[in-house]
Amino acid sequence: MTSWQKPKNRKYQGLIGLLVLLTVIGAFIVISFTLQTNDVTLTQPPDELLVFDLFTVSYSWQAPPLFAIIAAIATGLVVVVTFVGLELRDANLSRRSHDSIHKKLSPWVLMESTQGVFHGEVTLTALIPAHNEEALIGATIRSLMDQDRKPDRVIVVADNCSDGTVSVAKSLGVEVFETVKNVDKKAGALNQALGTLLPSMGENDTVMIMDADTVLRQGFLASAIKHFTDDRGLSAIGGLFFGEDRPGLLAQIQKNEYTRYSREINRRKGRVFVLTGTASIFRARALRTVAEERENLLPGLKGQVYDTHALTEDNELTLALKSLGALMMSPAECMVETELMPSLPTLWRQRLRWERGAMENIATYGITSTTARYWSQQLGLGYSVFALWTYFLLIVLQLISSDVWIWYPFWILMGAVFIAEKVWTVRNAGWKARLLASTLVIELLYDTLLGIVFVKGTVDMALGRKANWGDEHKHKIPRHSSKEHPAAKHRSSEHRVAKREGKH
Amino acid sequence: MNFINFIEGVLLPESFMESRFFVILATLVALNTVVYAALSIVHVIPKWFKPSWLRGRRPRGVTRSIYPDGPK
């Protein structure tokens, strides 16, 4: 970590928790003040309805007053418009920038330097970092070779492998780069490989970083190469990820989550939040520029593409590229199947790492035009946790202090709106996805789990607790090609789970 | 202690629902729920993108393609 990063990181690491706390206190103060000046009491006596002369139902038409509803909606929309505005402002600044000192990857700067000269066709080199992946690397390589537009080179970056990864890769005719004395896991392995690869690459050469247990959907590479061909100003393309084909409730919950995320990116016309580490393609020049600017405009060590201190190196690289003004996108055709966590403990560890990594990344970069959107996203997450938990608290308090169950048509309508949204946003993901969404409560419980992760991550960071992930740095569950034999799938699963749990 | 006494000790009195704390909490949750319901509706509404003929974009001065004679 460079010397300028440390104070900045310390200064910002407790900020998210503090901002959420201030927002929550502010909301309480505003409500208390409003209640003193207006009569918006919610405790009116309910009416009763006799159903088929059998039993009585208590109900109440009570609803918040119109002015409160309008004020609440207006507040929500103002917050959303502000968040979106912050992001658009940064995107437009980068898009229009001619600043070749601070925005070295802005589309205009790239285009001005390549104008009028043909630098050759777009090429694609796929790098697959692998640490003891002999069970899965074959399927990964074959899935890459099955693409309509095949990669020009495939290089397996074998990192401290003690199994047959290297021989499997060689038998399939791809190149192998073996790391030397790497102690920085995936990021360190990629840094070594990119260090030898990037210097000789030209303006239209691209590098794809792909996990060893990822399957690309057909058309990914062809679409990406077309985009890089049509736009000299484009720096990176990230895959839209979907859940792998895995049975079970926990898997379905994660699949629904990924489906909604991808839908959101499509609605944003491909503007990405994070270039996923599972499959993203970069213009070689963009990666070279990031490496050159570390210790200057960017954190990390000079000459290294990835910051090896980041828990979530893909998120950090996204911030690095965005800070330099890079244009990046996730086209709808660039889909990738990603791994799903097989159990609650692995899911917990994965999400805690993501959350902690994301917060550390923005704390490292501080509050800038580029990170403003990410800060506001964390703030929004924090407030959502508060909103959901107070909702549960209210229900519990009402249940244990009320003698009768009262039906509120207004709140039933609100519930119907939430269910409609949950079902609509996964409508193309199959009946299981729609069925799960229609229950609402299961996904609310899942949101509660993510809320606990957020609170733990925030508190740990504010207290300066060190994140110690040990061998959990890479949480991957078994992946398989759809063409593999079911028995092989099962064996692969066992192998990967055993490896993750440190049994191998 | 019999079971009924135990439950009465754990449950809150009905008057708790008229306490200031409960009313503030209920109002806050109500307003939050309305805000999130409004955001849910925003999520469901199809997003409308301006068609290219409405954007009135001027043709670019230079091509963005890697081919110098590519379309502008």
Image (cartoon, coloured by chain):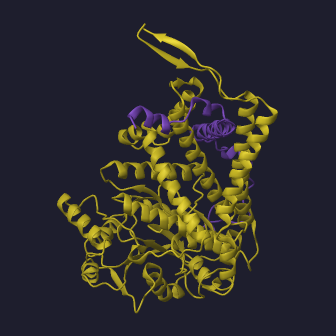
On the image, the x and y values in percent for residue A153 come to: 40, 77
Q: Is residue A1 above or below residue A83?
A: below
Please name the residue shown 71% across and 51% down the image. A25
Q: Determine the residue located farthest toward the bottom in the rendered image.
A: A181
Determine if residue A324 is in view: no
Q: Is residue A120 left or right of residue A215?
A: right
Q: Quadrant of the N terminus of chain A?
A: bottom right
Q: Quadrant of the C terminus of chain A?
A: bottom left
On the image, the x and y values in percent for residue A14 come to: 65, 68
Q: Which chain wears yellow? A: A
Front residue (pair A127, B11): B11
Locate residue A199: give its quadrant: bottom right
Q: Determine the residue located farthest toward the top in the rendered image.
A: A53
Front residue (pair B48, A30): A30
Front residue (pair A129, A346): A346
**Number of numbered labels in the structure image:** 0
Q: Is residue B14 above or below residue A381?
A: above
Please name the residue shown 58% across and 70% down the image. A461
Locate residue B18: give its quadrant: top right
Q: Is residue A297 left or right of residue A154?
A: right
Q: Determine the residue located farthest toward the left in the rendered image.
A: A487
Determine if residue A264 is in view: yes
Front residue (pair A450, A151): A450
On the image, the x and y values in percent for residue A475 come to: 39, 68
Q: Is residue A482 left or right of residue A470?
A: left
On the image, the x and y values in percent for residue A365 come to: 66, 73
